[in-house]
Image (tube, rainbow, N blue to C red):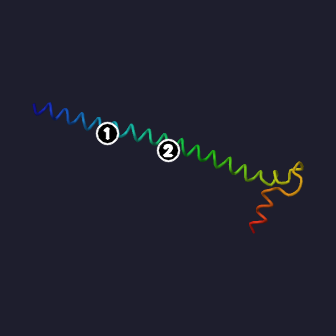
């Protein structure tokens, strides 16, 4: 009877460590996907910021740009 209990305890600890490793791997995969998503979002925002001067000087905008006007009024 004692050997059976020892085997069950060993199996239990093996399963617990296996489940922990599986959960850890899943969390690392989620973390990596979130990091990639955030990097992509930041790159898009950087492109948006760099293109702002081009948008503000666009010839189809008559008069001062609303953004420029609001920035001037904030100062």
Residue 40: x percent and y percent?
A: 63, 45
SS assignment at label 2: helix
Q: Quadrant of the C terminus?
A: bottom right
Q: Is residue 53 above or below residue 44?
A: below
In the picture as drawn, the residue positioned furthest to the left comes out as 1
Residue 66 vs residue 52, the one in the foreground: 66
User: Alpha-carbon neighbours of circle 1 within 10 Å: few (<14), some, or many (≥20)?
Assistant: few
Tell me residue 69's x, y (percent): 80, 61
The quarter in which the N terminus is drawn is: top left
| Mark 1, secondary structure of its residue | helix
Q: Mark 2 points at which residue?
A: 31
Residue at 30% across, 38% down:
16
Q: Position of residue 51 (x, y in %)?
A: 77, 51
Badge 2 density bin: few <14, some 14–19, many ≥20, Cα 10 Å: few
C-alpha span from label 1 to label 2:
21 Å
Q: Which residue is located at x 89 percent, y 48 percent?
A: 60
User: Nearest the camera: 17 or 58?
Assistant: 58
- Give me the residue at 31% from left, 39% from top: 17
In the picture, residue 72 is in which quadrant? Answer: bottom right
Q: Is residue 48 left or right of residue 18?
A: right
Q: Mark 1 points at which residue?
A: 17
Q: Nearer the viewer, mark 1 or mark 2?
A: 2
């Amino acid at each position: 009877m004692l050997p059976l209990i020892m085997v069950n305890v060993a199996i239990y600890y093996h399963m617990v460590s296996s489940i922990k490793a599986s959960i850890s791997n899943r969390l690392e995969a989620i973390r990596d996907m979130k990091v990639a998503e955030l990097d992509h979002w930041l790159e898009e925002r950087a492109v948006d910021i760099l293109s702002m001067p081009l948008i503000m000087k666009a010839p189809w905008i008559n008069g001062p740009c609303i953004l420029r006007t609001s920035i001037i009024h904030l100062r």
